[in-house]
Each structure stands twice: as C-alpha cells, then as structure tokens.
Amino acid sequence: MKKRSRVLSDYKKVGKKFIPPFIHMLGPMKNVSYHRSGIPEIIWMGLLNERFGIARGAEIAAKFAENAKELDAENRWAAPMTAIHDAFVNQSKELISGLDKKGILQDLRDGLHDFTVCYPENPLKIIFETQPSTLKDERYLSQYKEVFSSFFEKRGRPAIMMQANAIYMAFIQDKLKVNKGLALADFPEIEKYPNTEKSKQVGASICAALNMMFAHQVGTTHEGWKSYFWNQGFILEPLQIQKVWEDYEENFQ
C-alpha cells in the first residue's frame, strides 16, 4: 500500500482537496474584519499593555485565561470581551474572586476604569462591583486617542502584541495547538517583534491565527457591542475617529 505523504498527514481530504489542519479542526469559517470586529473585542488587552507594559500585560492575559479555564464549564476562549461577558455575567462574584486570587484584579480595574467610564456598556464592566462614572485621569481621552490609533496598524508592534496576548490565551485554554516546525510554534520570539525575521514570521502567523479564531466565533460574539463601540467612539470624538478611519482606508486597505 502506498504511504500517505507526511506533509499531508494532518490534512483532511474533502473531495480532491486537502484542507489544512488549522481549518478542519476549527470548522467552517467566515472572513472577519480585524478592524471592525477584532479591535472592539480585544482592545482591553492592548490598553493593559499600554498601561502596565508588555510583560505585565501578557501576565494579566495569561492569568485571566487560567481563571476562565478553571471557572467556566464551557471553557470559552476568554480573549473576546463578549465571550467573557457571556461566560460570567451570572457569576461575576466568582469571576472577581478568582481574578483577585490570581493577583490581577486591581490592575484590571485600574487599567480599564477610565475606559469603562467612556464606554459604560462595555462587556468587562462586570469586573467592577460599582460601575465607574468619573475619570481618574482628565487627560485620558487624548491619551486614549493615540493608543487607539496605534491598534489600527494591524502589523504595528502595539497591535501585534495585543493580538499575541489573545493567542496566548488560546494556548493556555487548550483552544489552539500548533505542530512543531510551524512559525507559530516559536511564539516566544514575538517579544523581539519586529526586529528579527523570525519574529515577523511569528507576527504574521499570529494575525492569521487570530482571524481564524474569530471566524470560528462568528455567531457567538455580539454585534451589539461592536456597533456600540464604534458609535460611542464617534460620540466621544467624532472628528478624531473619522480621521482614524480615513487614515486606515488610505494606508491599510
């Protein structure tokens, strides 16, 4: 009997086509816009990176994922904000207690306090026992505009590190497994992004993996939050948000 090529050993044959393992394991997927859908879901990690630094931001994401894996019976991928809300809206006390035991609750609250004041309906408001209503930092909006704009450059370092944390969470929650030899298997190299060729390869793989993870989530995440996020952005700073869109359309489409 003719042996099947090892190159295709993990592929699934559908008719005459071989479907890559990433695809057939995750199932049918739709294209998902990083800018319109991805940013609203994972911006919380980008904000924490900006506030506490890349190392602490990654640590917070990792411990959040550990907590979700321990508490959520369905072990939903806890990177998207709406998935967190779905998993813990009825057990917010348990979520808060777990985050406190992991040593990340205060940083989460400090890092997302002013964001929650500006976006009071954001899904992560459940980490607060009392809803924040007043900005701690009067300069927050002007600083937020700069940080927010940096996330639009999908392959820029702030955006890549934000996406990396989301994928890191998928690894911790056993939602994503990668074969040795693939670029994503060298995940720790992302710390050097974009200063080495290997880190650029890993960065590109992170973007692709995130898109696939989000595509698998289509139908389970809430369009309502994404619409609210963009509408609230226009209310907060209509001219600035419009400029971000114009810059994006000119440079990144």
Image: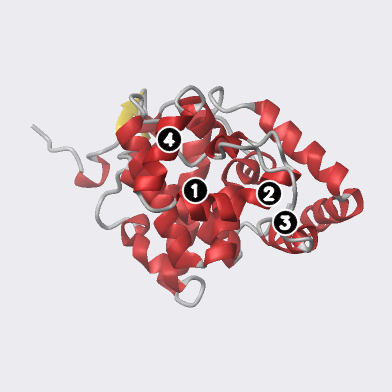
Q: Which residue in the structure is indicated by mark 4?
A: 95
| Mark 1 residue type | Ala
Q: Which residue in the structure is indicated by mark 1?
A: 208
Of the numbered discs 3 and 1, the one sitting upstream in the chain is: 1
Q: Which mark is residue 87?
A: none
Of the numbered discs 2 and 4, the one sitting upstream in the chain is: 4
Q: Which residue in the structure is indicated by mark 2?
A: 115
| Mark 3 residue type | Phe
Of the numbered discs 4 and 1, the one sitting upstream in the chain is: 4
Residue 240 placement (x, y as % from top left): 86, 55
Kindly indicate whether the residue at mark 1 contacts the one at mark 4 (C-beta within 8 angstroms).
no
CA–CA distance in space, label 3 to label 1: 16 Å
| Of the pair 125 and 136, the residue shown nearer to us | 136
Left or right: residue 156 versus residue 161 is right
Q: Which residue in the structure is indicated by mark 3?
A: 252
| Mark 2 residue type | Phe
The local crowd at label 3, few if under 14, some if 14 to 19, many if 20 or more residues have their Cα within 10 Å, is: few
